Image (cartoon, rainbow, N blue to C red):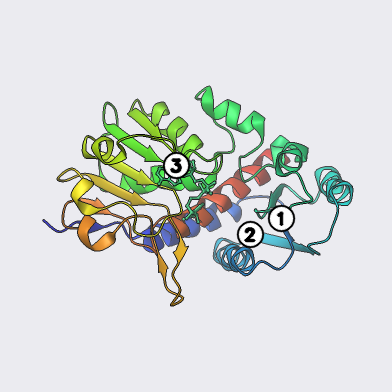
Amino acid sequence: MTAKIINGRQIADEYLRRIKQNVAKLSTPAIFAAILVGDDPASKSYVSAKKLACNKAGIVPKIIELPKTIDEPKLLHIINDLNQDKNISGILIQLPLPKQINTQTIIEAIDPNKDIDGFHPINIGLLAQKHPRFRPCTPYGIMELLKHTGIHLAGKDVIVIGASLIVGLPMTLELLMKDCTVTTCHAETKNLSNKIKQADIVIAAIGQPNYIKGKWIKENAIVIDVGINRLPDGTLTGDVDFESAKEKASWITPVPGGVGPMTVAMLLQNALLAAALHLT
Ligand code: NAD
């Protein structure tokens, strides 16, 4: 069979429309700060996508562009000012940061009540305890995409390939919250293809173009491709070999147009939550 496509762009747009309706009910505007350090083209394009989505959702982004030579104390000072600023309800730092800056120190410096990326240890801890507040946006968006397929998640065998703080680890926590049986794999995992063959749902987040082959996918599995890889010809591709995987899967996300737009939509969902928390 050929898989049905999970149209992340369309689902994200519906989400943004709903966020806009809720933003309109707030007594003050929802304003978040987005810090962009340096001029990495990928980071710049992610920030532009977030800005565009803000327009659709009626949320105001305050983009703070900083030079790539900025030192850690200066950046910490800026974050501290934003933590104190009563007009700013959310803060995000576009990753990756330049080498002279310790990413973990920066993540921990953000007020956890303004942490709309959901990476602060308190927010990851709350998710691990199954009482999430700010949920990391990519896994949060994937849970919404899975809802769209109509699958009942409890008891499903899910393989998460990749174990990063941003995607794989919180993805595992999200799925455990829904009573899935989760296998989390990483670069040291042995017999990856055999593990993939057992899974009802495959979530690939490794950053290796077209690495996951269709022949490894169980018939009718759901395939979520998080990877965003730029090929030498400039085109974007995922971590899954889409053409062969779509012949085995029941549902599959495309790249681009799958997980990416949902990640941005969930960031704005978190920005709405931050604005609402800020008013209480
Ligand atoms: P990362 O480099 O921080 O982590 C990659 C993970 O994959 C690590 O745990 C590593 O051990 C594992 N890995 C690498 N090669 C592997 C292999 N051959 N077999 C098994 N595991 C392997 O990357 P990340 O930040 O988690 O991002 C992963 C991919 O997802 C990238 O392509 C990134 O661009 C993309 N991404 C997309 C979105 C989105 O919104 N669509 C958001 C975040 C990241």
Does label 1 or label 2 sit earlier along the sequence? 1
Label 3: which residue? 162
Mark 3 vs ligand 1: CB below 8 Å: yes
Secondary structure type for disc 3: loop
Q: CA distance from mark 1 to mark 2?
A: 6 Å
View extreme (top): residue = 129
View extreme (left): residue = 1
Secondary structure type for disc 1: strand
Label 1: few (<14), some or many (≥20) within 10 Å?
A: many
Secondary structure type for disc 2: loop
The numbered dot on residue 59 is 2
Nearer to us: label 2 or label 3: 3
Residue type marked 2:
Ile
Does label 2 or label 3 sit earlier along the sequence? 2
Label 1: which residue? 31
Q: Quadrant of the C terminus?
A: top right
Residue type marked 1:
Ile
Label 2: few (<14), some or many (≥20) within 10 Å?
A: many
Answer left or right for 57 relative to 231. right
**Residue 259 at x, y percent in the picture:** 42, 55
* Residue at position x 46%, y 76% in the image: 234
Nearer to us: label 3 or label 1: 3
* Residue at position x 43%, y 36% in the image: 188
